[in-house]
Amino acid sequence: MNPTELKEIIREEIRASFKEIEKQWSEKFSEVREEIEVMKEEIKEIKKVTSEIEDSTNELYNKVDQLEEYTRLENVIISGVEYEDDENLEALMGKTIKIARELGVTMNITDISAIHRLYTRNVKYPPPIIVRLVNRWKKEQLISASKQKKMQGIYITNQLTPVKLDLLKKTKDLKRNGVVKYVWTAGNKILVRRSEKEESILISSMDTLIELGWKEEMNRRRRDRGEGEIRKEDSEPNNVVVQKKDDPTQRKQKQTTLPIAFSQGGIASSRDENTTAARNTRSSSKKR
């Protein structure tokens, strides 16, 4: 066998080897493609299920917020009322009724369904009072009077849900930066007006704020501070309250702001009733 024939045999063997390798790789690529296509279909299905879960979660989230909102329809928060160490139920109710009467609103003990102080970590100010009135008319009358006849240091507001409180905070950011001129609440609704001549706009969700330019304004402020642009989670209502560790300097405050509850059935003085009221107070303070 001469060298030329030997070279040709080697070339043929190499060609055959390459063809075999090409065939194997082609089969492998085909398998990979099939697996990728299967994975794409699985991902589509996962995205569909995830979207359905998100829609259901949002629906439940809105229903919970509506339910919480409904339970607060007769509630008002009175801030700025001086706290006394020996304050009892009668004193607390007396202060509330006195404020109402100074505002020109007739109020008696029978108008109050429940009343107690809310726990607060801010020791610089007296803990606010939450009052549940027997009807919404009396509540609206009280809030309206507090807007017309302002009392120094005393503020009377609706008890908003955590979602609405977060929306209100973000809405006030727009006012501070001149995007809107007026921000106010009516019942449990948040309203804004860009100018005196424009109609009021109902802030029902973050989508409304984003339409008004909230996201652009926040991004501008972040850029001015040298921070990154706003994240998706920053534009969503914050309904999570992180419980901080107990601060020894606030233990006295915590002890002196235990709830004092009152109902038409009488004073909640038993241990079980106070325990339940305390749990409700902690829950309410988180929501605020």
Image (spheres, helix red, strand yellow):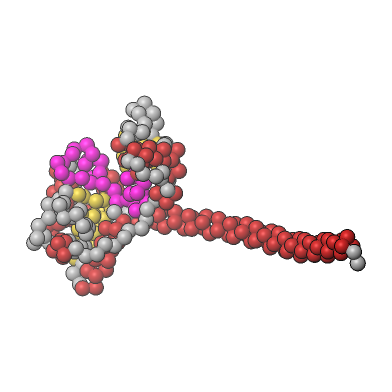
Task: Please state the horizontal and vertical placement of residue 84, each as a whole percent of the image.
Answer: 9, 57
Q: What's the residue at 77%, 64% (across, down)? A: 21
Q: Number of marks in the image?
A: 0
Locate residue 191 relative to residue 276 in the image: left or right: right
Closer to the camera in the image, 135 or 161: 161
Task: Please state the horizontal and vertical placement of residue 26, each as a whole percent of the image.
Answer: 76, 60
The boundaries of the magenta stretch are 142-169
Q: What's the residue at 29%, 48% (across, down)? A: 158
Q: What's the residue at 71%, 59% (across, down)? A: 33
Q: What's the residue at 21%, 57% (across, down)? A: 120
> Hey, which quadrant is residue 182 in on the image?
top left
Locate residue 52 relative to residue 190 in the image: left or right: right
Task: Please state the horizontal and vertical placement of residue 123, each as a whole percent of the image.
Answer: 16, 55
Is 207 located above or below residue 5 in the figure?
Answer: above
Q: Quadrant of the N terminus?
A: bottom right
Q: Quadrant of the C terminus?
A: bottom left
Residue at far top of view: 197
Closer to the camera in the image, 114 or 11: 11
Q: Is residue 199 visible?
A: yes
Is 208 located above or below residue 5 in the figure?
Answer: above
Is 286 located above or below residue 226 in the figure?
Answer: below
Magenta stretch: includes residue 160: yes
Closer to the camera in the image, 34 or 2: 2
Residue at far front of view: 2
Task: Please state the horizontal and vertical placement of residue 203, each as a whole percent of the image.
Answer: 40, 42
Magenta stretch: includes residue 49: no
